Image (spheres, rainbow, N blue to C red):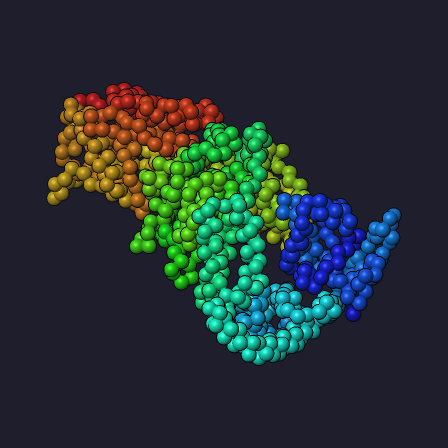
């Protein structure tokens, strides 16, 4: 019993039972050439439609005019046409039946179909709730019968044994409360077990009850087990005679029978299509597998190993080159639209891509995007692939310890598989994807090898044209792959690997950039993510920048925008929950105000400015971290010496380089004050204690030298520094101020935390000129110094800072 719901007209395609489309699965239909494909699309009506009703041929009505030569109920499938391979892929959606036929001009007919809504399946809900024990028993019965059938069929060369084994495993692991999953598995059983006639499969399609379909599968499996048992009994004497005859002739029974195996014949056909396109080494490896398969038979341990390796080779060397967009203007437009800001970064990427387009066989270095989390490194890789029209794959290298993850396992190991690089290329089916190696700085190494060294062969343009995976055993050309790496820091990357890369630093975003990104990208994205498509957004005073600025300043403290996106998500999700409580589950408009933001997110976590007026013996430094820049308070304090004989004690999680910088700073400060009798007396009579707050965080690096010097100097002369001034630079014992790195990250952090002036080495002046956004240079004052003596008038502007 069923009810129908009328839907739009679709073409009708009759098909044999072996090619029937299942619910939730795909089936590919290939034609011999492009002309045949286009004729088929025109004749069936698929040229103008994206879906079709797939029905089984009716053997009783075969030869009669349409629509009588096929059954009236089938599966509606989405269709995808690939003119390159002359194929149509059908994806099963739901069952439907023909409810009307209209003869049009010529021989074409128009069919009206309707979705089949089965009452029996609706009532199955109670079966899943009330009959769990019965359902579990039935599924176990089907699983055991399938395994028995597979054992009995080993000598019969079953063509779909792998699929049946997979289905049996899925039944064993299936959740008995997952109705849709169980139903799809039962469909797979019915259509994968051989020997079903077209009427039997049609009866299954029209079945209105899941318990009925389960019983049908048990019945069919029982019948096929009997067939397999009888076939094995009748074939045994013949097999003995064949073996004896071949032994007399000096031949092998398995060798002769394997030549007729459908699995081998199909793979041989795939090899014939590609053999002229691959290297002699690859041909040799494939032919060796065919030769060894001829010396064994299905069921042997070596058989599965050889078949898996042969499938890997055929799939790898069958990969095709994806057409690439060669108009650099279009590439720039697409990539530019996907990311706001980062203009200098995008310019360098455009230069790299232009070279790649102009000379695809060139040996340009690999791009490595370096920056804190949340600045968009991975999404830039995706955008590069989209702008070039290439396939994209991302492989996270974080925590990888085993070299075999990159190069594959040697085939002598049990359970060996190819490396991640080959696996992903096979999965994509493309020789030239954009391949993102994420978190390349987090690779580990141990007794299983050094994965970063294994990457050298992958990323080196001088070597990767002949990359050899241990499992594959033959060379494969990776030069067409566009590799892009990402990292948070360069310090942990092996120098030899770093030498193969072109480093592009992504320091982070300014407040202005974050506001624009939130308005144009993050807010529209989260409106959809939280279930409000089409929601009209109105901002307080028609000024979105003002409201978003409150979120940026009060609730985020990061270089990227990941936390900002989480806060925006929280606003819409909490507001959505409140509207549901108020009875409005689908609001159409929202007014976002500062009061609403505070109500939904709570009090601001951060003040507008972390920088404060410094006390005596305190200076503000600038630090670089893997997650962006930060300001750092460095404090010096004189304490009674007691029994301690050393001049200085240090606390705050300081590592060796930082401690060395502090000793240099003390020497410089003492030299500056050697004529200041009072300051030198204070130092002689007291112990100097240096501290950097947040002692739980390890700190290292020489760039705090200038900050530490001024903190000590301030403490010894008992005068505070000028407020809201931050600094960074290495100081030598001679008082010279040397260049440091991470300038953009440090300056962005200073601006974010309310610093008004920044002191930097004169050697870093070009970094400020080229890398710091204009809106920051307008509101901050920069001082560039080459010696510590040039710093004193800046931080003590009123009078002589070091009286005698």
Instruction: Write the residue at 38% across / 56% down.
Output: 410
Q: Is residue 394 visible?
A: yes
- Between residues 584 and 494, which one lies in front from this camera angle? 494
Instruction: Write the residue at 72% across / 67% down.
Output: 198
Q: Position of residue 44 (x, y in %)?
A: 77, 51
Q: Position of residue 239 (x, y in %)?
A: 54, 75
| Vertical arrangement, residue 770 with respect to residue 428, above or below | above
Quadrant of residue 228 within the rendered picture: bottom right
Residue found at the far top of this picture:
799
| Vertical arrangement, residue 188 with respect to residue 375, above or below | below
Q: Position of residue 11 (x, y in %)?
A: 77, 53
Q: Is residue 438 visible?
A: no
Image quarter of the N terminus? bottom right
Image quarter of the C terminus? top left
Q: Viewed as shown, does residue 562 lie left or right of 488?
A: right
Instruction: Write the residue at 36% across / 48% down.
Output: 451
């Amino acid at each position: 019993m069923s009810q129908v719901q009328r839907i739009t007209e679709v073409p009708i395609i009759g098909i044999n039972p072996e090619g029937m489309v299942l619910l939730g699965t795909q089936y590919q239909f290939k034609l011999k050439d492009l002309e045949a494909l286009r004729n088929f699309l025109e004749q069936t009506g698929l040229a103008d439609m994206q879906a079709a009703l797939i029905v089984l041929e009716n053997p009783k009505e075969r030869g009669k005019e349409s629509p009588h030569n096929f059954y009236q109920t089938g599966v509606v499938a989405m269709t995808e046409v690939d003119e390159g391979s002359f194929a149509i892929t059908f994806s099963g959606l739901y069952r439907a039946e023909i409810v009307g036929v209209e003869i049009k001009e010529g021989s074409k007919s128009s069919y009206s179909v309707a979705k089949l809504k089965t009452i029996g399946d609706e009532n199955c809900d109670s079966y899943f709730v009330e009959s769990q024990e019965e359902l579990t028993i039935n599924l176990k019965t089907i699983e055991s019968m399938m395994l028995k059938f597979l054992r009995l069929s080993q000598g019969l060369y079953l063509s779909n044994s792998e699929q049946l084994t997979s289905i049996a495993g899925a039944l064993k692991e299936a959740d008995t409360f997952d109705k849709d999953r169980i139903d799809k598995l039962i469909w797979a059983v019915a259509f994968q077990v051989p020997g079903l006639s077209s009427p039997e499969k049609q009866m299954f399609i029209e079945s209105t009850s899941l318990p009925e379909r389960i019983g049908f599968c048990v019945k069919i499996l029982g019948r096929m087990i009997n067939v397999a048992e009888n076939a094995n009994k009748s074939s045994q004497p013949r097999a003995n005679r064949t073996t004896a005859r071949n032994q007399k002739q000096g031949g092998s029974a398995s060798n002769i029978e394997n030549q007729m195996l459908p699995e081998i014949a199909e793979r041989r056909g795939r090899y014939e299509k590609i053999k002229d396109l691959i290297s002699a080494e690859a041909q040799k490896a494939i032919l060796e597998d065919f030769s060894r398969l001829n010396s064994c038979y299905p069921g042997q341990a070596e058989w599965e190993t050889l078949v898996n390796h042969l499938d890997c080779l055929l799939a790898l060397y069958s990969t095709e080159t994806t057409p690439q967009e060669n108009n650099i203007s279009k590439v720039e437009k697409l990539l530019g639209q996907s990311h706001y800001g980062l203009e200098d970064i995008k310019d360098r990427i455009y230069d790299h891509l232009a070279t790649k387009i102009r000379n695809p066989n060139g040996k340009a270095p690999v791009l490595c995007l370096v920056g804190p989390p949340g600045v968009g490194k991975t999404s830039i890789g995706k955008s590069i692939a989209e702008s070039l029209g290439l396939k994209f794959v991302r492989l996270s290298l974080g925590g990888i310890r085993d070299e075999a993850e990159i190069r594959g396992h040697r085939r002598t190991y049990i359970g060996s598989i190819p490396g991640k690089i080959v696996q992903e290329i096979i999965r994509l089916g493309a020789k030239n994807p954009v391949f993102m190696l994420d978190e390349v700085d987090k690779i580990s190494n141990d007794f299983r090898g050094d994965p970063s060294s294994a990457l050298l062969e992958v990323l080196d343009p001088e070597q990767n044209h002949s990359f050899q995976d241990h499992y594959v055993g033959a060379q494969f050309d990776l030069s067409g792959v566009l590799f892009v790496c990402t990292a948070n820091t360069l310090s942990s990357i092996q120098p030899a690997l770093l030498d193969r890369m072109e480093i592009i630093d992504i320091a982070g975003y300014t407040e202005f950039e974050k506001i624009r990104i939130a308005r144009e990208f993050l807010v529209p994205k989260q409106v959809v993510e939280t279930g409000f498509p089409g929601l009209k957004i109105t901002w307080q005073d028609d000024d979105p920048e003002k409201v978003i600025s409150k979120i940026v300043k009060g609730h985020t403290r990061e270089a990227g925008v990941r936390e900002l996106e989480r806060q925006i998500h929280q606003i819409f999700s909490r507001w959505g929950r409140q509207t549901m409580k108020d009875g409005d589950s689908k609001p159409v408009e929202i007014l976002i105000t500062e009061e609403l933001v505070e109500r939904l997110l709570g009090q601001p976590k951060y003040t507008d400015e972390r920088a404060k007026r410094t006390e005596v013996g305190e200076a503000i430094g600038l630090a670089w971290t893997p997650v962006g820049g930060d300001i750092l308070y460095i404090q010096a304090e004189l304490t009674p010496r007691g029994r301690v004989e050393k001049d200085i004690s240090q606390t705050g999680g300081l590592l060796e380089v930082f401690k060395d910088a502090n000793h240099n700073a003390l020497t410089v400060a003492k030299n500056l004050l050697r004529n200041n009798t009072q300051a030198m007396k204070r130092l002689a009579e007291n112990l100097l204690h240096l501290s950097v707050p947040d002692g739980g965080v390890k700190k290292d690096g020489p760039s705090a030298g200038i900050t530490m010097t001024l903190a000590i100097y301030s403490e010894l002369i008992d005068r505070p520094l000028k407020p809201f001034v931050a600094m960074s630079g290495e100081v030598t014992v001679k008082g010279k101020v040397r260049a440091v790195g991470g300038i953009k990250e440090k300056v962005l952090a200073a601006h974010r935390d309310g610093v008004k002036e920044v002191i930097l080495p004169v050697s870093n002046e070009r970094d400020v000129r080229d890398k710091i956004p204009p809106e920051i240079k307008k509101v901050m004052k920069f001082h560039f110094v080459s010696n510590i003596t040039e710093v004193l008038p800046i931080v003590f502007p009123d009078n002589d800072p070091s009286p005698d």
